[in-house]
Amino acid sequence: PPPPPPPALSGNVNGQHSATDPRLAERPPRPWFGGPLVPLTFQLISLIIAAWYGAKLLSRPIQRLSDAAERLSENLDSEPLEESGPREARQAAHTFNKMQRRIIEQVKQRSRMLGAVSHDLRTPLSRLKLRLEQIDDDKLQGQMRQDLDDMISMLDATLGYLHEQRTSEASQWMDVQALVESLSENAQDRGADVQASGHCAPLQVQPMALRSCINNLLDNALRYAGQARITLQDHREHLVIRIIDHGPGIAADQREAVFEPFFRLEGSRNRNSGGVGLGMTIAREAAQRLGGQLSLEETPGGGLTAIIHLPRQD
């Protein structure tokens, strides 16, 4: 008879697993986040965070130095930079503060020198005007007196220009429309033909700088045209002020040159109409201190229009 079937084996038969081998049972699938992926991802995230934080630490002293330079450009008497942080940052802050002290000292020395020059020049000029009375020739006396008056005017204008350069003031909210109307009324009280129009909301400006800018442009228009019109055009981002006249105007190739100190057009080199060539320079520098721009355009129909763009700060 045939032999009985062999019993089920739990081991290997010719090196193969049997059907009842528990190792052949279906294993659960390994999750996707298992294995070495988790620690690698954690290390990558940690590295990114560390790099970002390190970059912030490295850029912080540079940002502090930039902020201090911005404050210094607006006000020489601003607070000095704190000398803290890494050695390189402390050294840069120390050098910056040293530079600020030297600039302040140089400005003070210039102010003292200007005061001395003003006093020393005015004294002999005043004596010369007194001695003119001893000259019998009336024509010569008048010519010399006019020359002395011109010298005194140039001295006053130069000192005023240098004073404008070293003057710093804090910004504050100002009713620009009220300022323009006040300047227009003051000119009308002196017999000048000045009109103001337009409306605008209050603006954050340096009051003395804005007054100086508009005043110089208005005086220039009245000197050459005899009349002027000031208009306000308010926008969301900026304010536009125009000082319009219908005088002789300025040629297009000379409109930038008039902003140079002591530059005068050939037609203005006379005692009746020409100044010393500093009014337009003072006006542009005042507009720049306000963060704005000053440009010149031809008035439709003839004349000159000075345009001031002042930004609105949030």
Image (tube, grey):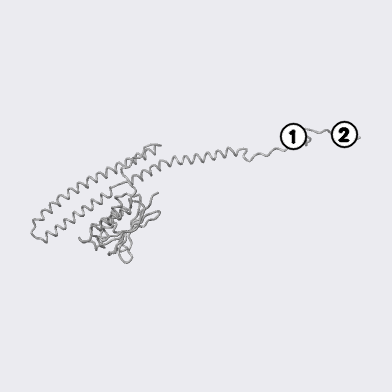
Residues packed near mark 2 inside 10 Å, few (<14), some (14 to 19) or many (20 plus): few
Mark nearer the N terminus (1 vs 2): 2
Q: Is residue 127 shown above or below 90?
A: below
Camera-side mark, 1 or 2: 1
Report which quarter residue 41 is drawn in: top right
Q: Which residue is mark 1?
A: 22
Residue at x 9% of width, y 56% of height:
133
Question: In the shown orientation, is residue 181 left or right of residue 30?
Answer: left
Query: Where residue 214 is drawn, which disc sits there?
Result: none
Q: Position of residue 94 (x, y in %)?
A: 34, 39
- Say which element carries label 1: helix
Residue at mark 1 to residue at mark 2: CA–CA distance: 26 Å
Q: Position of residue 256 (x, y in %)?
A: 31, 59
Q: Residue furthest right?
A: 1
Q: Nearer the viewer, residue 35 or 205?
A: 205
Question: In the shown orientation, is residue 139 left or right of residue 274?
Answer: left
Report which quarter residue 92 is drawn in: top left
Q: Position of residue 116 (x, y in %)?
A: 19, 46
Question: In the shown orientation, is residue 26 left or right of residue 174?
Answer: right
Residue at x 33% of width, y 65% of height:
300
Q: How many marks?
A: 2
Residues packed near mark 1 inside 10 Å, few (<14), some (14 to 19) or many (20 plus): few
Residue type at mark 2 is Pro
- Say which element carries label 2: loop
Question: In the shown orientation, is residue 227 left or right of residue 150?
Answer: right
**Quadrant including the N terminus:** top right
Q: Which residue is mark 2?
A: 4
Q: Position of residue 200 (x, y in %)?
A: 36, 54
Residue type at mark 1 is Pro
